Image (tube, helix red, strand yellow):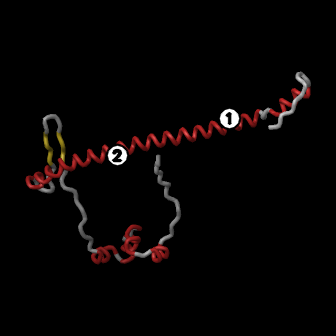
Amino acid sequence: MAVTVHKAGSKAAESAVVAELPSLLEVQAQITSTFAESALKSEVDQIYQIDRTISKMEESIVALKATLKSKMEPLMEHIDVLYNAEDKVTLQGFEHMIELSAKGMKVTNIDKATLRAELGEDSFDDLWAIGVGDIRKYLNPKQIAKVLTEERLAPRRTKVIK
């Protein structure tokens, strides 16, 4: 900023001072920019704090789940000996109760040949799905590029680093 000396009280002096002052729009833009930068920094700090809180909660949950598992495993071994797999069991504590459902069903095998015969070839091909994970597991990257079309559409992962 250049400084020009004018006689005090003169029109030239007033005009020179006014000309050197930033315009109202420039001041507003600077304030807005500073405010936006400050707001962004505040948001980043808040995101960090929330992420740290979630991380601590997740650590606590992992520890609690491990404790629960260590208590449930021996109990389940006894329940499996004492009750049939299809039995629903209710256990009474001094103050609380827990209910254990019948063991859940889990598919252990699918007879593809029989399924194909029962559905018919077209329906079987329409229904039988191969997951992307399986494709990645069995094909090399060059083969994968031939059979999959990929686009970056998934949300970004956020990693808080400080």
Q: Position of residue 62 (x, y in %)?
A: 30, 48
Badge 1 density bin: few <14, some 14–19, many ≥20, Cα 10 Å: few
Taking the image as shown, residue 47 lies to the left or right of residue 112, namely right
User: Mark 1 falls on what kind of element?
Assistant: helix
Q: Position of residue 59 (x, y in %)?
A: 33, 46
Of the image marks 1 and 2, the number of the one nearer the N terminus:
1
Q: In the rendered image of this protein, does residue 154 appear above or below residue 94?
A: below
User: Mark 2 falls on what kind of element?
Assistant: helix
Q: Look at 83% across and 30% down and name the residue there.
A: 18
Q: Position of residue 74 (x, y in %)?
A: 14, 51
Q: Position of residue 117 (x, y in %)?
A: 30, 77
Taking the image as shown, residue 143 lies to the left or right of residue 25, namely left
CB atoms of marks 1 and 2 within 8 Å = no
Amino acid type at mark 1: Ile
- Say whether residue 129 is visible: no
Q: Nearer the viewer, residue 126 or 61?
A: 61
- Say whether residue 66 is visible: yes
Residue 115's tag is none
Q: Nearer the viewer, residue 145 or 12?
A: 12
The N terminus, quarter of image = top right
Q: In the rendered image of this protein, does residue 52 appear above or below residue 149?
A: above
Find disc 1 in the rendering and name its residue.
31
- Alpha carbon separation for disc pair 1 and 2: 40 Å
Residue 58's tag is 2
